[in-house]
Amino acid sequence: MPSATVDTTDTRQRLLDAAGKVFAEKGFRSATIREICKRAKANVAAVNYHFGDKERFYAEVLGYAHRCALEKYPPHLGLAETATAEERLTAFVRSFLLRVLDNGRPAWHGKLMLREMAEPTAALDRLVEESIRPNLDLLRSIVTDLLGDAATDDDVRASASSIVAQCLFYYQCRPVITRLNPQQSYDPAAIDRLADHITRFSLGGLRHRAEERRRERS
């Protein structure tokens, strides 16, 4: 019995990894269960057994990729609960960059997420509610602390979006960046420098906005 359990778990994992690669290469609509099972060395019926239909299978693969990244680089990066808002922002930015730029993670993770953003499916709704929204809420809470009581909801939303956009720029525009600046690297030290820059740049903007709001109220 234990050996059968191990084999079942192994099959499920092989299906997730194989599906991630196929979905990343071909997209949800063009990928076939038959090709995924062939790469995973699994019976075609295994997908239905472990995941159900293709839509639920794809949603699980998408969530799996995102969970792997978050487990490796959580937004708090192990900070103590007493950490300052500045420290929490630094950790959030650094963890975000590590999740999207880490060369050590499977290449299909990032490629799959990019394809989903370009060609969204129903699975994106689930991913947003279960994972992306909670992380954005965390960032907004950090921004709220940094802006102070005078900040409006629009200030918080716009500031959080700007911080995320800076991080995504280095991932989505990576092919152009490396052509414009061939010396640009994405090793851990380079990611730390980018995180420091984005954090300092963002803190400067947040402090300026907070001061503007205080002057308006006085």
Image: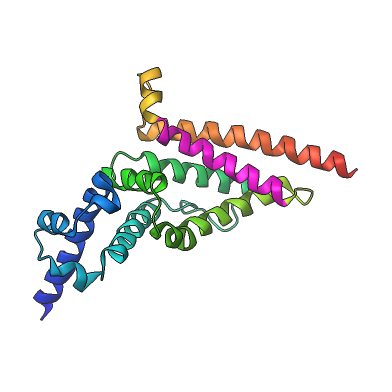
| Relative height, residue 27 to residue 101 (above, below) | below
Residue with the most extreme bottom position: 1
Image x and y of residue 13, in percent:
20, 62
Left or right: residue 79 versus residue 9 is: right
**Secondary structure mostly taken by the magenta-highlighted segment of the chain:** helix
Image x and y of residue 215, in percent:
86, 39
| Relative height, residue 119 to residue 80 (above, below) | above
Left or right: residue 93 versus residue 1 is: right
Is 11 magenta? The answer is no
Q: Name which residue lies at 27% across and 42% down.
A: 107
Image x and y of residue 44, in percent:
12, 65
Quadrant of image for the C terminus: top right
Q: Name which residue lies at 59% across and 39% down.
A: 162
Image x and y of residue 194, in percent:
47, 32
Residue with the most extreme right position: 218
When asked about the image quadrant of residue 7, the answer is: bottom left
Between residue 95 and residue 157, name the one nearer to us: 157
Left or right: residue 124 versus residue 150 is: left
* Residue 44 visible: yes
Left or right: residue 6 versus residue 26 is: left
Q: Name which residue lies at 58% across and 56% down.
A: 137
When asked about the image quadrant of residue 161, the answer is: top right
| Relative height, residue 174 to residue 117 (above, below) | above
Quadrant of image for the N terminus: bottom left
Q: Which residues are magenta?
A: 153-173
Between residue 115 and residue 91, name the one nearer to us: 115
Is 163 magenta? The answer is yes
